[in-house]
Image: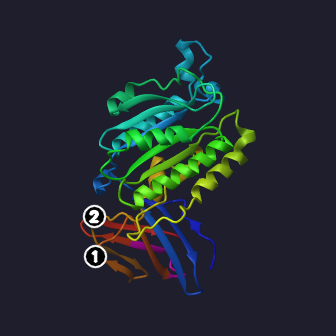
Amino acid sequence: MSEWIYVKDCHEFFGEVKHRLVSDAEREVELVIKPDASLGFELAITALALDGSKSMLRTYAAALPKMIRKKQNKVHPIAQDLAGFLAKNSRNQCAIAYWACGDDGSEIEPVGILNSGEIEAFDFAGPQRWGGGTKLTPIIQYFWEQVFSSADKEGMAVILTDGAWDDDDNANLFQLTQVMCEEIAARRRHLMKGVVLGLKTDDNKGEIERIDARFNALNNFEPENVPNPDGIDLDVWYTAWVDELDDWNGIFIELVKEWSLGVGGFVEAQGQKVLQKDELNFGVQFQIPAASPAFLLHLEGLGDYEQNIL
């Protein structure tokens, strides 16, 4: 079995397409349809937390005179675009906050729940009290216990950071994640998908390896001894570097794989149907002949989508 090959030139309908040889005769393909409101995709609520530690001062251009600060602020356009995207996919609301604030980096500064128009007018200029450390658990706990506590279905909290959080905080974060998984599995709460996005700056080049280690630990987190007879999604974390995302839809890929599209369809390769279902998910898996250069996905009432892979 070969390694997964990710298709770089995906059809605009697909968020991700990958394939690998499983034998001399067959190739396995996995794709994820790009989440969109027209397909019924909507989250209960979203949140965006922006790193307010002192290491971000230069990235925010916080030391510059106010008249020219906004043009040099590298965080503002990213935060504004991302927050607007999140609001668009969650009932036109996104909770905004700064985190890693205060003397030890444990404080948060909530901005509020903003709609698209308010996000467009907001100046993402940084917190009032820049942080002297980096603690991630407090902002996750704030979102989980207050902002998302009454959510009626899945939501997403996105964390933007330029650094690795403290060792003690990392242990606390794992403990909180365990509790979250227990409550989700027991159907007391809906999933709050945590997405940590790394922002590469001129000041964190020497910390990339440590940040990657933190990312990998979150991605590989597995709750211990959590009864889950219904097979509820307990994959709380997803991490990525901002500069490696093709677009913001990439943060939804892991979340929606098991979500139903509500329509049926089939996959065809070399003139033969290789998969047919009355109801497909956003994530679709199938096998095609190893030498097949392309496949076609047909969705009832939506259309045909052809993808080259070789």
Please state the extent of the stretch shown in magenta in the rendering. 289-296
- State the residue at coordinates (59%, 85%): 23
Residue 148, horizontal then vertical, whole percent? 38, 44
Q: Nearer the viewer, mark 2 or mark 1?
A: 1
Can see residue 82?
Answer: no
Q: Which residue is mark 1?
A: 278
Q: Residues within 10 Å of mark 1 (few under 14, many from 20)?
A: few
Front-most of 43 and 59? 43
Residue 121 figure quarter? top left
With 105 as the anchor, is 277 left or right in this view?
left
Quarter of the figure with the C terminus: bottom right
Q: Tag 1 or tag 2, which sits nearer the N-term?
A: 1
Examine the structure image and report whether residue 82 is included in the region drawn in magenta. Answer: no
- Viewer-nearest residue: 267 or 114: 114
Q: Residue furthest right?
A: 206
Q: Nearer the viewer, residue 87 or 25?
A: 87
Is residue 292 located in the magenta-colored stretch of the structure? yes
Q: Quadrant of the N terminus?
A: bottom right
Q: Which mark is residue 302?
A: 2
Callout 2 amino acid: Leu
> In 3D space, how far apart are the residues under numbered discs 2 and 1 (Cα atoms)?
14 Å
Residue 87 visible (yes or no): yes
**SS class, disc 1:** loop
Q: Is residue 283 left or right of residue 206?
A: left
Q: Amino acid at mark 1?
A: Asp
Looking at the image, residue 108 sits to the left or right of residue 115; the answer is right
Q: Position of residue 309 (x, y in %)?
A: 52, 70
Give the residue displayed 41% in from the left and 25% down from the top. Answer: 122
Measured as percent of width and height from the top left, residue 282 is found at 38, 64
Name which residue lies at 56% across and 51% down. 175
